[in-house]
Image (spheres, rainbow, N blue to C red):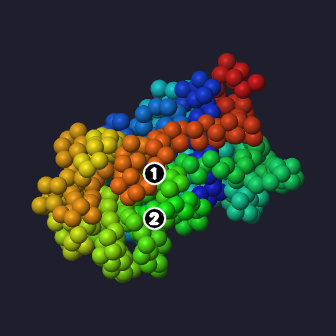
Amino acid sequence: MIQGCGSDVGKSTLVAGLCRFFTNQGIRIRPFKSQNMSNNAAVTADGGEIGRAQALQALACRVPASVHMNPVLLKPQSETGAQLIVRGQMEGSWSAANYQHRKALLLDICLESFRALEAECDLVLVEGAGSPAETNLRKGDIANMGFARAANVPVVLTGDIDRGHVIAALVGAHTVLDTGDRDMIKGFLINKFRGDPALFAEGRAEITRRTGWRDFGMAPFLPAARRLPAEDAVALDKARAGHRGRVKIVVPRLARIANFDDFDPLQHESAIDFTFIQPGTALPGDADLIILPGSKSTITDLAMLRREGWDIDITAHLRRGGRVLGLCGGYQMLGRRIADPDGIEGPPGEAEGLGLLNVETTLTGTKTLTPTKGHLVAEGAAFEGYEIHVGLTTGPDAARPFLHTQAGPQGAVSANGRVAGCYIHGLFAQGSARAAILKSLGAASNAADHGNIVDDALDEIAAQLATCLDVKGLAEIAGLPATALRSFS
């Protein structure tokens, strides 16, 4: 189990890289994270949803994603509440306080899923959540030491040296953990190091001296990780160097933005100037396309969009001849009305939409979770993606569908053709669909399937980790047989 001294220390990337490394060694491996919190989710082959990181890790293992890989998923809807997903299915919304009191009840479900994976492979790589040193959250824990002890899984603790304070973080965790939890930790590793590794040799020795933990190595800062889909919205707060192409595409950064990895393929297009627009900043007047992204709380994010004045910016953009595309929750916002009579995404109620498409949406208690493929109506180009949403959208503009899926026509297009929306995530991932959409904007595409970019990045990360981490030692503490260990000699 890879745990960390905090969130965003690189646990997900390390697990993905190690999954690919062991897979390339011919070992059957599965990823697992008992409890995740993310609004970036993926549809699984067995008809549910899990966190994006575990879907990526399944890809690293070259196996289909399963609900067992992330049996508990929390999707934040407000500062104090989240939608609860258990084994891929929606189980209602819980406040943070209620969840802390009741999460221990989910431990048996997590253990059952873990054992199901364990039965079909040689090695399970488990990812922790946040930090085990948050001792105020230890009671009823199912994400870190609570799970590790219940499943008897050896732990390696990760420190992020890029943040600084890494010696204190690791030694401090050793200090505050109780004896039983501390005994689960078999060693540590350092992540995101920049520069000459020899310069931190003394620091690593100091950590070992103070903790007695085995040193499993130090991973460098991995540029290839930028080519992997991000799971947490914290990634959107970091400056990203992008291309400054002739065609400008912007996405307003909504508070509850969901599945924003939809836009990763656009950031690899040299002809595109792509930007997430942060709150407090106007949508640029020279944009060619504004995309409204998915949202975990559509009515709340629609209100935020109006507070930011982005609705006025969108109206001005259309007057100048620009185009607007809405995906999932963004599609719902483009309509005349959104109703949530049962309080699926927040308090029951309804809101007036932007009125740019003549459709209306009613949120329902049934969530659509399905992979899908089809073609764009206007361009005829093929796409593959997935649907993950609550709500039914109908109206006159739906008679002009944006695309056709296996299930039939979907989405809507305005009478003038400059506003469109649909429920499909992953629309830009396949080269043919992305190239057709960019061509309609006057931009040439590299037409590469984004999946190949991600796959190459996983192989690159795996190769780098093999040179800097004690992968043989990791295999040993995981209990792999000696026949498997010969691969690492």
**Residue situated in front as seen by the camera: 455 or 247:** 247
Disc number at residue 158?
A: none
Q: Is residue 322 above or below residue 91?
A: below
Q: Which residue, given by chain and number where applicable, does mark 2 sit on?
A: 248
Q: Position of residue 5 (x, y in %)?
A: 65, 57
Q: Is residue 55 above or below residue 292?
A: above
- Please tell me how crowded label 2 is: few (under 14), some (14-19), or many (20+) other residues with Cα within 10 Å: some
Q: Position of residue 403 (x, y in %)?
A: 25, 48
Can you tell which quarter of the image residue 239 is in?
Answer: bottom right
Q: Which residue, given by chain and number where applicable, does mark 1 sit on?
A: 444
Could you tell me the amino acid type at mark 1? Ala
Q: Kindly state the secondary structure of the residue where label 1 is placed.
A: loop
Could you tell me the amino acid type at mark 2? Lys
Q: Position of residue 194 (x, y in %)?
A: 76, 55
View extreme (top): residue: 483
Q: Kindly state the secondary structure of the residue where label 2 is placed.
A: strand
**Residue at 62% across, 59% down:** 6
**Residue at 29% across, 47% down:** 379
Q: Quadrant of the C terminus?
A: top right
Can you tell which quarter of the image residue 252 is in?
Answer: bottom left
**Residue at 28% across, 53% down:** 423
